[in-house]
Amino acid sequence: MPHQKQKLQSSHFSVSSHAFPAIDGYPLKGTLYTPEHDIKANIVLSSATGVPQEFYRRFAEYMTQFGYQVLTFDYRGVGQSAPASLKGFKMSYLDWGALDLAGAIDYLAQDQLPVFMVGHSYGGQALGLTPNHHKVTAMYCFGTGAGWHGYMPFKEKVKVQVIWNILFPPMVALKGYLPWSKLKMGADLPIDVYKQWRKWCKNPTYFFADPEQQLLIEKYAQVKTPIYAVSALDDDWALPNSRHAFMQHYAQAPMQFINIFASDYGLKQIGHMGYFRKGSEKIWDDIDRTFNQHFVKQNG
């Protein structure tokens, strides 16, 4: 896999910018974190909604010490993969998994090494959308749930309803996209992502209840990749009931549900974003141990 622009060299890894196509040809921008010595496997990091790839830099750097080459990337319409203006930019929220993540998996699979996946929130949903999920040896995901406010604690439930029903609509009407960055909540989002996300979050089973998306039930049931689905018990957006409401649709995938407390990892709080913040290295150690078991099993 040819490296493109070299950006950083450390004692045990290098970092390079990469451009690669989604499976429909849309140009995506990613960053590859490559161990200095032998690469034993690849990891593709599938981001949360509106979270630019730079957020996952510390995690990617950390995992190189175990021999993993890590690819972070921005979905179309986000960060480095966004057009000059989001106004008028057309896409489906499902494209991020069905086309973009699928392209990232194919890009990593070229070197014939095992491909593992780490998903954050939407990132854990995205595997079931891909046509090439069979190329992923195992997935570890964090904070993946159905998004319905009814699964959230009362305070968060009220906050989310205010955001969806009072705050966002006039912002989107004015701009023609969701200017999420103005609230310091993430990258700006295409209007179609906003509309579909808002629609699906109104239902306890998310897009599986959408009459227009019934084929997704069968599609997710085809996934047989082992999945490790983690919920921090202070993650108000993806508590275990929300996680189960979504993850149950990976009907044939060997599934382990893992609940964690911040105190177990020496942290004061994890929430929805803390899985990948500085200080979460002990959580990342769990990923290495799990993936290494699959690597050993696969390679004798």
Image (cartoon, rainbow, N blue to C red):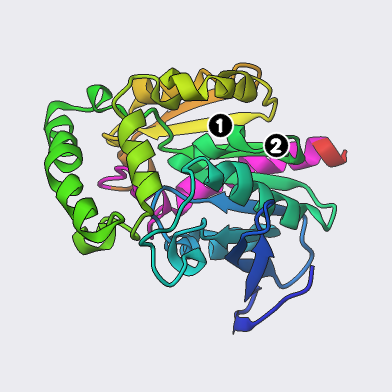
User: Which residue shows up at 20% across the image and 39% down it?
Assistant: 164
Q: Residues within 10 Å of mark 1 (few under 14, many from 20)?
A: many
Question: Which stretch appears magenta?
Answer: 268-297
Where on the picture, by quarter, is residue 232? top left
Residue 208 appearing in the image: no
* Position of the N terminus by quadrant: bottom right
**Label 2 secondary element:** loop
| Total count of labels | 2
Residue 31 appearing in the image: yes
- Which is closer to the viewer, label 1 or label 2? 2
User: Which residue shows up at 68% across the image and 58% down it?
Assistant: 25
Q: Main secondary structure of the magenta part?
A: helix
Residue 273 among magenta residues: yes
User: Which residue shows up at 33% across the image and 41% down it?
Assistant: 195
User: Which residue shows up at 11% across the image and 42% down it?
Assistant: 166
The amino acid marked with disc number 1 is Tyr
Q: Position of residue 268 (x, y in %)?
A: 25, 47
**Label 1 secondary element:** strand
Q: Position of residue 148 (x, y in %)?
A: 30, 27
Where on the picture, by quarter, is residue 79? bottom left
Q: Are marks 1 and 2 in contact (CB under 8 Å)?
A: no
* Mark 1 to mark 2 CA distance (whole Å): 20 Å
Residue 241 among magenta residues: no
Q: Which residue is mark 1?
A: 228
Whether residue 16 sits left or right of residue 143 in the image: it is: right
Residue closest to the eye, 85 or 121: 85
Q: Which residue is mark 2?
A: 131
* Position of the C terminus by quadrant: top right
Where on the picture, by quarter, is residue 270? top left
Please tell me which of labels 1 and 2 falls first in the chain. 2
Residue closest to the eye, 165 or 232: 165
Q: Position of residue 56 (x, y in %)?
A: 47, 59
